[in-house]
Amino acid sequence: MEMVNITIDTRKLQVPAGITVLEAARIANIDIPTLCFLKDINEIGACRMCVVEVKGARSLQAACVYPVSEGLEIYTQSPAVREARKVTLELILSNHDKKCLTCVRSRNCELQKLAEELNIKDIRFEGEMGNFPVDDLSPSIVRDPNKCILCRRCVSMCKNVQSVAVIDTMERGFRTIVSSAFNKSLSEVPCVNCGQCITVCPVGALREKDDTDKVWKALDDPDMHVIVQTAPAVRVALGEEFGMPIGSRVTSNMVAALRRLGFNKVFDTDTAADLTIMEEGTELLNRIKNGGKLPLITSCSPGWIKFCEHNYPEFLDNLSTCKSPHEMFGAVLKSYYAEKNGIDPSKIFVVSIMPCTAKKFEAQRPEMSATGYPDVDVVLTTRELARMIREAGIDFKDLPERTFDDPMGEASGAGVIFGATGGVMEAALRTVAEILSGKSIDNVEYTQVRGVEGIKEATIELEGITLKAAVAHGLGNAKKLLDKIKAGEADYHFVEIMACPGGCVNGGGQPIQPSEVRSWIDLRQERAKAIYEEDKSLPIRKSHENPKVKALYDEFLGEPGSHKAHELLHTHYVKRENYPVE
Amino acid sequence: MSTNNCCCCGGVDEREQKLQEIIGKYKNTKGALIPVLHEAQDLYGYLPLEVQKKIAEGLEVPLAEVYGVVTFYTQFSLNPKGKYKIQVCMGTACYVKGAGAILDKLKEKLGLNVGECTDDGLFSLEACRCIGACGLAPVIMINDDVYGRLVPDDIEGIIEKYKKISE
Ligand code: SF4
Ligand code: SF4
Ligand code: FES
């Protein structure tokens, strides 16, 4: 690697050529404030918060985009730099809606933190407030332009990473706003509700639709049997909300906290993930054997489903008809569980704790009410659960050891790995391989489909079948993969697609880490590690060996793919028009 | 969007065909969006959703980006123009000499807000930057005709004159 000699604040160091001043400063452990910068996603040098003095340059330079070169001398803390940063920040604050006390991002806001770090005590400018309407019509995403600082991270995420591109900068000058075409609500445009824009917003301008009130109300209703289920990715991220290290596994604390909140039953969505594998594995085998539509594409990610419905309707028949695990679970709770325990399904209230904002949209799809009642009543994100735990005054780090309730609390490792990209594929392979061979297979790890590479391909020799598989995560990658299939350049049997980069562990409902963390630490990998650890720690690692799932089939559903299973656990999809003209 | 009769250039199908020709002409060139928007605006008089949507699809540019460009440049319009396009100069000189009152009178007389067009497609109303006729302030333009040194009471007569011509 070519190295160059540079000086930062009188410290001499050797750094790789071509990196930015910001990266070089990091190596020297010198902190330069940033605001619009988010590594690999938004490197546009727009906000000028990161300015530094470069010897010989006429004006201050933005460290996040300025490349180092031999002999470069940089000053990160000169009076001119300090004053410029303050002016920049005060200008941003001058027309910012400063209602920090009631802002969902208070104490996790990059703007607030900068104001504190730069010791802003007075704002010398008074800007005209925009007074923009807040868009809260979407079931998943709330957009408040009054808090927006125009960093454009969300625009880049939606356009460049997700290839959805429903938000952009509009107008100019003081009227500039991040919005959708014709100022439509996100509920009227082909937004897929992935929430990735929320996770990159440095401030409170983007947030999930908060549904905690509905859950408190159900919990306070003595007639209601309130059941909560938690997705695999929640337990490896929730701890971050309480200051624990990224990748902490907090399954026990989470279950204990949910009990304290007053839920009647605390179940594990992983159990339903095992059920999903039984249904989807059967579907895959049937399609392969009977010449059905291939590739079979997974359907657990409602953001991906909506993307497909808007942009690739020609693939709707490729989608697995399986509902996502938490929806399957809801349907089972309001039928099998209700019957078994003699509870009127109208008195069962199902809450799903998900790493996902798209699942809020999914839960209110009319198709998702197999029993005549909504399969799932409310979806809360990991962040909303953390808010409820705080509101209840629960000391999250100091809770007794607890495990999920019976009978829906036991899951296999296969159900757990659903939370990471490649996990559904791997879980399915574990089961399909054994069904085909008719014997127990010891090696359950299909590492070819793990990891954060955007598109992963694998050819797997199963008893008598060479299975070609592909995994894509992040919708930009999904688009590339679909275009390849469409062009006839690939013929897969089985494809897994997750809307969020890294899969559910990095979902739009997960704890938000600021740029200074997520620019340098791969959240996807750290959280996924915890998922695979949990998989390894479990006695059962194959879905079809889960005794609770076996019992469910024996006592109630019959066979995977049975008529009853279809009624409760499967669904269909609709073509959606983009920007309909009235 | 409802079809409106503000535009005076040909049938719908014919225009749509022309729009596709314009898109086709620029399709594979870099920076195609702005020239296509210009020609489309000349064709339709303004750039409603259905036109922007066709351009977005044709050029494979996200609609949000198209709309971003349309709202960034003042020469693009989201609203239809009337047969008689009224522009009220809001430059400093006109403003000081009472352009505000002229504009209010026009709004009242036509029942329009700035950027709108009357239902019969006759008049549209806009506020514009200085048109360089400061000596005549306050000034309005109706298509290419300039009216200067106006007082609000002049408006009635001017509007009536155009209504007569178009009968
Ligand atoms: S939720 Fe996803 S699709 Fe919708 S605006 Fe945000 S990033 Fe784009
Ligand atoms: S909404 Fe948030 S991420 Fe998007 S531009 Fe505004 S401040 Fe940045
Ligand atoms: S310009 Fe560098 S962080 Fe915004």
Image: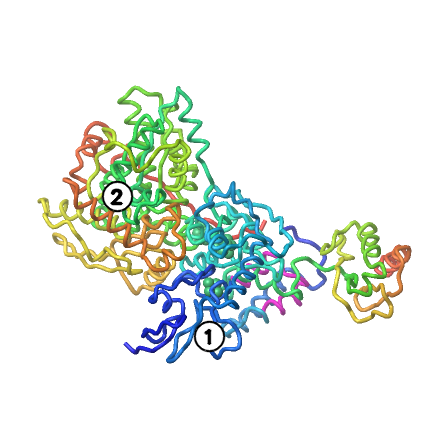
The chief SS type of the magenta part is: helix
Name the residue tied to disc 1.
A54
Chain letter for the residue marked with disc 1 in the picture: A
Q: Position of residue A35 (x, y in %)?
A: 47, 59
Residue closer to the observer: A554 or A423:
A423
At 24% from the left edge and 60% from the top edge, which residue is drawn?
Answer: A457
State which region is magenta.
B36-56
- Which quarter of the picture shows residue A452? bottom left
> Which circle, 1 or 2, is nearer the viewer?
1
Q: Secondary structure at mark 1?
A: strand
Q: Amino acid at mark 1?
A: Val
Residue holding disc 2: A249
Task: Check the image and tell me how it is coloured.
Answer: rainbow
For disc 1, the neighbor class at 10 Å (few under 14, some 14 to 19, many from 20) is many
Q: Chain of mark 2?
A: A
Residue found 34% across the figure and 76% down from its top = A17
Q: Which amino acid does the dot numbered 2 rest on?
A: Arg
